[in-house]
């Protein structure tokens, strides 16, 4: 019997996750929630970019989702700018007996030692009341900061440092809110966007740092942040809009999990809007962008992950991967014990049932 799934959010990740749901026979879509009024009433197949009619029309809010009583909800609504609201949504779903898997709110990827205990307890209580489980995959694009480094670390005799990197040109990424408001592209260099407000990097990627530390049996003393920006040499256009000369056109940041004053777990992002900016920063392994996992130890590793797609560029491929991990985790999330689940206690998803001829 197909797993009944409700879907929430049809942005960059959500649209592709929805397409994955609709093309996978393991799932039956029973409700769809959107945040944009112009999408209300439109068929899920259309919003997923597919040439098919599902008979499921988009609504706003969670009423239709709750009324449908799905086995699982895929939560891909915006979490970066509405964290408390996103957490409240998840709690409501869990309390109603609906399992949740998604890309947000990212802090729930591994909330321990980042969120106050009373808030974690509230989520766990809702899950216990509804006999439901929660799995948030996180970012970069939802596997590069946990699955890959853990797989490599499991072959080592000793480890001194783990570094996870995203090196990408974001010129084709059309998420206006993320690009301009969250990351600060196109803003004056002396303006501080959401991402670089004190502590935000440590919260956004601290989940990945703490989860890696827990898997490696490491106690992190502190999480520190550094960043730098590069101005545009001239005016130019990107998918999200215009970038004026002198405004932010490239940035690099690191989140460092410190042990005895040493950066033991590091997440680094090098994000450009043009390939010619800051050639001294790390370069991708393929044109446009790639991910890199480096382990210093015995043995040491430097592994490049180069996502590609038949339907788009490196940015599209990375989002497809993020959406794929979410959708493919649904059966295990439904089967999991109640509560917050993480990569450390979820089964390995192997791609069962995904083979397609040709």
Image: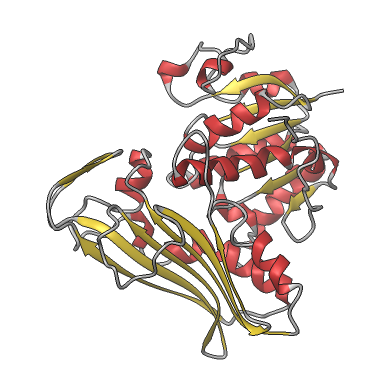
Q: Is residue 226 left or right of residue 236?
A: right
Counting from the top left corner in percent of width and height, residue 232 is at 18, 56
Indicate the quadrant containing the C terminus: top left, top right, bottom left or bottom right: top right
Q: Is residue 34 above or below residue 247?
A: above
Q: Residue furthest front?
A: 358
Q: Residue furthest bottom?
A: 260
- Please name whichever residue, 53 or 138, is drawn nearer the observer in this view of the structure: 53
- Count of marks overlaid on the render: 0
Q: Is residue 296 above or below residue 84?
A: below
At a point 83% along the width and 40% down the height, the residue shown is 131
Q: Is residue 190 left or right of residue 225?
A: left
Counting from the top left corner in percent of width and height, residue 32 is at 60, 21
Question: Is residue 310 among the parts visible in the rendering?
Answer: yes
Indicate the quadrant containing the N terminus: top left, top right, bottom left or bottom right: top right
Colour scheme employed for the rendering of this structure: secondary structure
- Please name whichever residue, 6 or 305, is drawn nearer the observer in this view of the structure: 305
Q: Quadrant of residue 23?
A: top right
Q: Is residue 26 left or right of residue 49?
A: right
At a point 72% along the width and 19% down the height, the residue shown is 68
Question: Is residue 112 among the parts visible in the rendering?
Answer: no
At a point 55% along the width and 51% down the height, the residue shown is 141
Counting from the top left corner in percent of width and height, residue 191 is at 22, 59
- Please name whichever residue, 45 or 336, is drawn nearer the observer in this view of the structure: 45
Counting from the top left corner in percent of width and height, residue 174 is at 36, 38
Q: Quadrant of residue 48?
A: top right
At a point 60% along the width and 12% down the height, the residue shown is 52
Q: Is residue 72 above or below residue 44?
A: below
């Amino acid at each position: 019997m197909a797993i009944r799934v409700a879907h929430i959010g049809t942005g960059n990740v959500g649209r592709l996750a929805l397409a994955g749901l609709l093309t996978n026979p393991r799932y039956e879509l029973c409700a769809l929630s959107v945040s944009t009024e112009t999408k209300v009433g439109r068929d899920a197949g259309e919003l997923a970019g597919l040439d098919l009619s599902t008979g499921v029309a988009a609504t706003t809010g969670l009423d239709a989702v709750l009324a449908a009583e799905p086995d699982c909800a895929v939560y891909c609504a915006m979490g970066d700018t509405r964290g408390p609201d996103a957490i409240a949504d998840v709690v409501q779903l869990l309390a109603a007996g609906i399992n949740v898997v998604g890309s947000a709110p990212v802090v729930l990827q591994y909330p321990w030692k980042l969120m106050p205990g009373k808030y974690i307890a509230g989520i766990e209580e809702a899950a216990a009341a509804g006999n439901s489980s929660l799995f948030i995959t996180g970012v970069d694009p939802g596997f590069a900061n946990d699955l890959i480094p853990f797989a490599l670390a499991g072959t080592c005799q000793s480890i001194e440092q783990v570094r996870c990197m995203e090196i990408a040109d974001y010129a084709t990424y059309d998420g206006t809110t993320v690009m301009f408001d969250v990351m600060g592209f196109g803003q004056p260099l002396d303006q501080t966007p959401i991402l670089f407000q004190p502590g935000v990097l440590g919260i956004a990627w601290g989940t990945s740092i703490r989860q890696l530390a827990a898997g490696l049996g490491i106690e992190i003393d502190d999480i520190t942040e550094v960043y730098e920006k590069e101005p545009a040499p001239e005016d130019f256009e990107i998918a999200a809009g215009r970038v004026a000369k002198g405004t932010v056109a490239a940035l690099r940041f690191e989140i460092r999990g410190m042990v005895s004053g040493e950066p033991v777990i590091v997440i680094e992002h090098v994000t450009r809007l043009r390939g010619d900016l800051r050639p001294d920063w790390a370069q991708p392994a393929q044109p446009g962008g790639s991910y890199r996992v480096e382990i210093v130890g015995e043995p040491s590793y430097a592994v490049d992950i180069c996502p590609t797609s038949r339907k788009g560029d490196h940015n599209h491929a990375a989002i497809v991967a993020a959406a794929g991990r979410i959708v493919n985790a649904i059966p295990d999330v439904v089967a999991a014990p109640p509560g917050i689940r993480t990569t450390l206690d979820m089964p390995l998803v192997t791609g069962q049932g995904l083979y397609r001829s040709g």
